[in-house]
Image (spheres, rainbow, N blue to C red):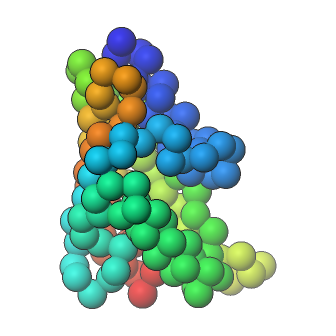
Amino acid sequence: MKDKNKQIVTDWIEKKLHGQGNPMDDLDPSVVFCIPGPNTNPIFGEFTGLEGVEIFLGLLLGKLAQKNLSQTIKVVSCLAEGKQVVAFVEEVFSSKEPNMAEPYISHGAWLFELNDESKITSLYCYDNTKVTSKALA
């Protein structure tokens, strides 16, 4: 079960968050996303349920478009114990314009909980909020 849960989380981050399938398909309807950070950035906070996650994704995509940035997320490593998975990730925010500023790179740990149906019930993102705030300010 640990390896299956690690694979679900890795695929969700590296494939579905990058447009290869619908990321909402792997979420429990009562899912809770928590991205701690300063309340000056609307992507930080707690987002509950599928509607809340859709709001979060809309805010994030809006910020990326506004700043003309692309975002890639790579799983560096994963640990799993039962229904909990910690994914150590590297997020890169890059300008879509050639020869522009250096990319913003953030490293974090994302804690996932899955239910018996292998659906994600919670995600707590522990990111470098200083980098994320600077990229999306």
Q: Eyeballing the image, is 68 above or below 45? A: below
Q: Eyeballing the image, is 113 above or below 61? A: above
Q: Position of residue 104 (x, y in %)?
A: 50, 70
Residue 130 located left or right of residue 5: left
Residue at horizontal 34 percent and vertical 80 percent from the top: 42
Q: Is residue 55 visible?
A: yes
Q: Quadrant of residue 39?
A: bottom left
Residues 71 and 83: in front is 83
Residue at horizontal 41 percent and vertical 68 percent from the top: 56
Residue at horizontal 59 percent and vertical 87 percent from the top: 66
Q: Position of residue 33 (x, y in %)?
A: 30, 55
Q: Position of residue 18 (x, y in %)?
A: 63, 52
Q: Quadrant of residue 1?
A: top left
Residue 124 located left or right of residue 16: left
Q: Looking at the figure, which quarter contains the C terminus?
A: bottom left
Residue at horizontal 67 percent and vertical 51 percent from the top: 19
Q: Eyeballing the image, is 16 above or below 47? A: above
Q: Position of residue 135 (x, y in %)?
A: 47, 78
